[in-house]
Amino acid sequence: MFRTAFRITGNAADAEDVLQTVFLRLLRRTQADAMDNEESYLRRAAINASLDVIRSRQSDRTMELVDVASNRSDADASDLRQVLARAISTLPQRSAEIFTLRFIEGLSNPEIARMLGISQVLVAVTVYRTRQQLRKELGKVLGDRS
């Protein structure tokens, strides 16, 4: 869960906050709420809590976006991750979750479909549409480099 949260939020402190949030949510669940797959639940909870952290950062717009077109490759990669995280956080919850599971966690479409209890076709369509939407959003920020 920490790895998932860290990949999405981009820093250890936020990832630790996500872990606390997930475990608090887990504690609040009643025993009547049976979980079919604990790993799936925890991974999904970590993704959703991480996206909540990024969304809350967006509401505090005290910092301007840094110029992504700098010549330093390390800065480019870091800036690109931040821009991508912000773009993902603007997606609908289900789309962000599917995109994260597919491209950040590296799960296949059939694995995601089983985990979420939806069809593989729906996963594929959502991935396609989400990629198109992110390409459009990132194109606004990155210009022709997307």
Image (cartoon, rainbow, N blue to C red):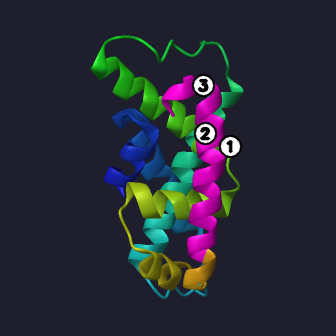
User: Mark 1 touching mark 2, by CB under 8 A?
Assistant: yes
Residue at 30% x, 13% y is 72
The residue beneath circle 2 is 87
Q: Is residue 31 magenta?
A: no
- The image position of residue 66, as x and y in percent, is 51, 13
The residue beneath circle 3 is 141
Task: Tell me the amino acid under the disc marked 3.
Answer: Val
Helix, strand or loop at disc 2?
helix
38, 133: nearer the viewer: 133
**Residue 30 appears left or right of 22:** right
Compared with 81, 60 (above or below) is above
The residue beneath circle 1 is 90
Circle nearer the viewer, 3 or 1:
3
> Which numbered disc flags the more N-terminal residue, 2 or 3?
2
Residue at 71% x, 55% y is 92
Distance between mark 3 and mark 1 Cα atoms:
14 Å
Task: Tell me the amino acid under the disc marked 1.
Answer: Thr
Distance between mark 2 and mark 3 Cα atoms:
10 Å
User: What segment is highlighted magenta in the picture?
Assistant: 123-146
